[in-house]
Structures are given as structure tokens and as C-alpha cells.
Amino acid sequence: MASSSAKMPLSVALGRSALPIVVWLGFAAWMLVDWRSDPYDPTLTGTRAYGHNGDGSLWWLAVSLVELAVLMAVTCPFLRQRPRWFFVLPMVALLPFAGWFVLNAMGSMHGGGVTFVHLFWLLALGALLVLETILSGVSALSGRAGSRGARVEGQSVE
């Protein structure tokens, strides 16, 4: 059965679900620190405002929380049993996140620190998706090999 070979220990499932949250908390703290060190200054206009946080820069904090929710929904790290084909989901999710990263990279050209921290968060998000793809793929391959070996050993020779 596919589900019995794809079982994941609870500690691994909890570790996979906690890692993105801990990474997000680190980036959220970084965004808040940057906002406090360079708050919005309405007297900066035109090119003088480049590189400084704009009005509503903390909006990226809420956007990053939505991105975290999407990551958790796609990778489902809290599941202890996964189908073998599960490694395809994070791999496919890399495509829209890559496009979102490019769009944000272009938009952050004249942005402030919070915008750049959000860009680094997107890089970390991509790295987490690549890591999940690799871990899920290795898990699927090792589960297949184990289940084939069990069937071969269980056969009787007549």
C-alpha cells in the first residue's frame, strides 16, 4: 500500500511544519526592525525617497503572511502520510512563486528596507519549496524501493 510506505515520523512532520513558520517569524521581526529604524518620512519626495520605507511599507508583512499560508497549503508539512506523487506539488508551486519574485524584484528597485526584506523572504520561500521538493522526492523514492523489496521478499518460491 502506498500510504503505509509514505508514513512520516511525527517529529519530522512537526519539524517540517515549524521550519517555515520560524523562518517567517525571523523575516517578520526583520521587517519590523527595519520599519522602526527608517519610518516613513513624508518630507522625502521624488528621488530623495528612494531607498527609504514608503507609506504603507508594512503592508508587505501582511502579504508575507498570506505567502506563508499558501506555502503551508501547498506543501502540507503537517501531514504524516502523503501520496508518493506529492513531491510534484512544491515543484509546480515554484513557477508562480518565481514569477511573483521577479515582479517584486522589479518593484523593489526604488523601495525601502521593508521591501527588500520581503524580497529576501521570497528567496527563502523559494529555497523552502526546493527543499520540500527534494525531501518529498527522496521520501517517495525510498518508499517505493521499500515497498518493492517487501513484495519480493513476501513472494513464495515454488
Image (cartoon, rainbow, N blue to C red):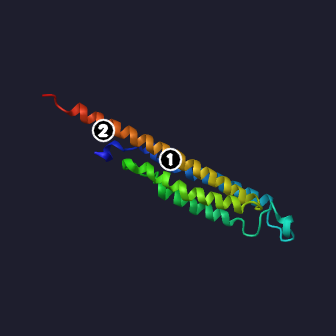
Q: The residue under label 1 is which amino acid type?
A: Glu
User: Which residue is outermost to the left?
Assistant: 158
- Quadrant where the N terminus is found in the figure: top left
Tell me which residue sits at (65%, 61%) in the image.
103
Q: Tag 1: Cα neighbours inside 10 Å, few (<14), some, or many (≥20)?
A: many
Helix, strand or loop at disc 1?
Answer: helix
Please report whichever mark, 2 or 1, sits nearer to the chain's N-terminal start: 1
Tell me which residue sits at (37%, 44%) in the image.
7
Q: Is residue 138 above or below residue 56?
A: above
Gap between marks 2 and 1 measured at Cα: 22 Å
Residue 46 in the image: x percent, y percent? 85, 69
Nearer the observer, 93 or 31? 93
Tell me which residue sits at (19%, 33%) in the image.
155
Label annotation for residue 132: 1
Tell me, yes or no, whether the two marked residues, 2 and 1, touch with CB atoms within 8 Å.
no
| Residue for badge 2 | 147
Report which quarter residue 52 is drawn in.
bottom right
Report which quarter residue 62 is drawn in.
bottom right
Q: Tag 2: Cα neighbours inside 10 Å, few (<14), some, or many (≥20)?
A: some
Helix, strand or loop at disc 2?
Answer: helix
Residue 102 in the image: x percent, y percent? 64, 58
Residue 21 in the image: x percent, y percent? 56, 53
- Residue 75 appears anywhere in the view: no
- Quadrant where the C terminus is found in the figure: top left
